Amino acid sequence: MDSLQAKAEIDRLVQDLNRHNQLYYIQNAPEISDYDFDQQLKQLEKLEREFPEYVSENSPTKRVGGDLTKKFEAVAHRYPMLSLSNTYSEEEIAEWENRIKKSIDESIEYVCELKYDGVAIGIRYEGGQLTAAVTRGDGEKGELVTTNVRTIRTVPLQLQNDFPSDFEIRGEIFMPHEQFEQLNKEREEAGEALYANPRNTASGTLKSLDSKVVADRKLDCYLYGLYGLSTTEVGHYESVLKAQNWGFRIPSPEKRFIEKTNSIQGIMDFIHFWNVERHNLPFDIDGIVIKVNSYEQQRKLGFTAKSPRWAIAYKFKTSQVETRLEAVTYQVGRTGAITPVANLVPVQLGGTTVKRASLHNADQIEKLNLHTGDIVQVEKGGEIIPKIVGVNVGQRQSLQKIQFIEACPECQTILIRKDGEAQHYCPNESSCPPQVKGKIAHFISRKAMNIDGLGEETIEVLYDKGLVQNIADLYKLTFDQLLELDRMGEKSANNMLKGIEASKNVPFERVLFGLGIRFVGETVAKKLAQSFGNMDALSRAGYDELIDVEEIGEKIAISVQHYFQDSANLALILSLKEFGLQFEAVKKESVSNVLEGKVLVVSGTFETFSRDELKELIERNGGKVGSSVSSKTNYLVAGANMGPAKLKTATNLGVIILSEDEFIKLIS
Ligand code: IVH
């Protein structure tokens, strides 16, 4: 391809992919499959590598991040970023509305919106292209975080239709609950400290210098203000609706995320509705914002020093109640981390019964100066787990201060607390029951060995019966042993053994992740597997070699070294090797050409591999991956839960249908 052709092709792909992104994320109406999208994106990446002179700032390849920033540039806001005056009282909202009516002697429309609990952002578009994104900062100047904002899929990179030539749109960037919980789950699995709430996490993420991290965290954004539009625009509500035509995902009027009303009753109704419904949203809001709709009336009302007179925020009271602290108990996690838990006299709070609250660590207990039997204030804000925010000292009866335990409640080993760390740990990794069981549960989990037919309950039983004391013992289990367990039939026993056997084909990086080495999460395991190639090399790697690997810092390097210095771990690794687990990374280069000239379609779900892994295997063995079954298809690799239509088409066309096992046989 010559340079001119390449430019034309890059332009076409950028346009197309930006449009498909919009269809998928904003309109929920995709026109092409994820697979086809990925293929086109790969094609664009390839062309951009070959012709870097044609890479544009708003290329969809920027969505996945990768660019590193040394330091964010400070830039002045074109329009100052003001805050809102706010109140917790409905009466004050009514007073505000009365003041507005007195100042403006015309009919007035109000727009009610959600007050998103995240970080404010101002995004500028010039000629329909996203050119800058600036954080609030001190309201006058903010930080230029454009590269990071480009990774947020609901923020368009390129506008369509009749957009204004140069304007700014403002909104709130936040982390949806699902993402937040997933992130904390991954951190827990990697033995890392958990994040406190979605807002701080979103704010921290947005300021990450590595845009890849931002892309992975999947932030989201809602827009609530437009600046620099032509003076012919009538009102805020109408502008927001218009922004939808330009490609923005706007707050949905159908879901009552935004609503126009001309009365205080309408405003109150909106407040009451969301005061209840906010608990069912997939993200946090901390109140409601009410704005005068007409731009003309907004201009008449003007500003005070800090905030506009034409808007006000009604903030929800975080629900808080008092109850008695009965006792503090301690949980031991998979990594040995000790979490103190407050056991409370059950109390109703925000629609649920609260019996327990997390106390995080010893410092937290010290800070609250907790005593047994204290009346404590429990709050449920944005966070999912309620927390203790204070003690009613006036009602204290007990003189018994809560003392953090010194020994592990499960195995009585003396706890340790490393310098600079907030958490206490039980160092007895190899025989502290919850640590051992937790490690086995982690090993069999979906993202690690994904062993079918084996769940946490069975692990519990196998451990209690002394059949499985560590992960290697799983591979020694026999059919007869399993049959002796309660409620275990022949079929389940067989399934379990089949699942265990199949796990011997799970790629090295997932075996490594499954070992549960502290701080070695999924991504780190992948990096280590790729850099060292096999378990042997990794176990011998020195500190310097380890930190040379991208994304591996001091903490991880020390933890990995520590793991391989432990003789019990080495013995475990040796037996896993003897059982035939994958200890070598599959080379990225092709492994064979058995599938050369063949087109394979993958459908359904599989036991040993994820769909992506299967596709990679096909390509590495010389085959091509097709997106749908056609006359060009040679094989259909059929997993469980596959659609009947696909199977029928394949049968009609005489396509060879392979099971997972048959596929493995074919390539090995
Ligand atoms: S309007 C001039 N609308 O709340 C006022 N702000 O306390 C511009 N916020 O800095 C703000 N949701 O970060 C507005 N629907 C909404 C909002 C909203 C959240 C945040 C925003 C602002 C802060 C003010």
Image: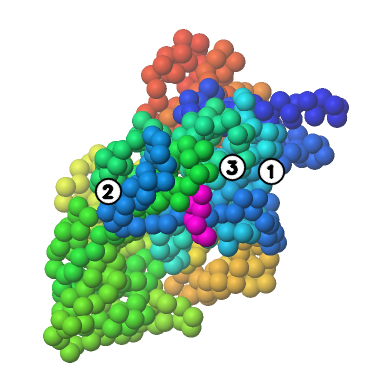
Q: Which of marks 3 and 1 is in front?
A: 3
At horizontal 62% and vertical 30% (from top left) the residue drawn is 163
Which mark identifies residue 275?
Answer: 2
Q: Which of 9 and 641 is in front in this view?
A: 9
At horizontal 32% and vertical 52% (from top left) the residue drawn is 95
Residue under numbered circle 1: 131
At horizontal 68% and vertical 60% (from top left) the residue drawn is 74
In the rendered structure, the answer to whether residue 409 lies left or right of residue 526 reads: left
Span colored in magenta: 302-308
Give amino acid for label 2.
Asn
Identify the image quadrant of residue 575: bottom left
Give amino acid for label 3.
Tyr
In the rendered image, residue 199, in percent from the top left (x then y), is placed at 44, 57
Question: What separation in Å lies between label 2 and label 3 (alpha carbons)?
Answer: 30 Å
Give amino acid for label 1.
Thr
Question: What separation in Å lies between label 1 and label 2 (alpha carbons)?
Answer: 37 Å
Labels 1 & 2 near each other (Cβ < 8 A): no
Question: What separation in Å lies between label 3 and label 1 (alpha carbons)?
Answer: 15 Å
Mark 3 surroundings: few (<14), some (14-19) or many (≥20) residues within 10 A: some
In the rendered image, residue 307, in percent from the top left (x then y), is placed at 49, 56
Ligand 1 neighbours mark 2 (CB distance < 8 Å): no
**Could you tell me which quadrant the C terminus lies in?**
top right
Q: Which residue lies furthest to the bottom in this view?
A: 399
Residue 182 in view of the camera: no
Residue 390 in view of the camera: yes
In the rendered structure, the answer to whether residue 380 lies left or right of residue 307 reads: left
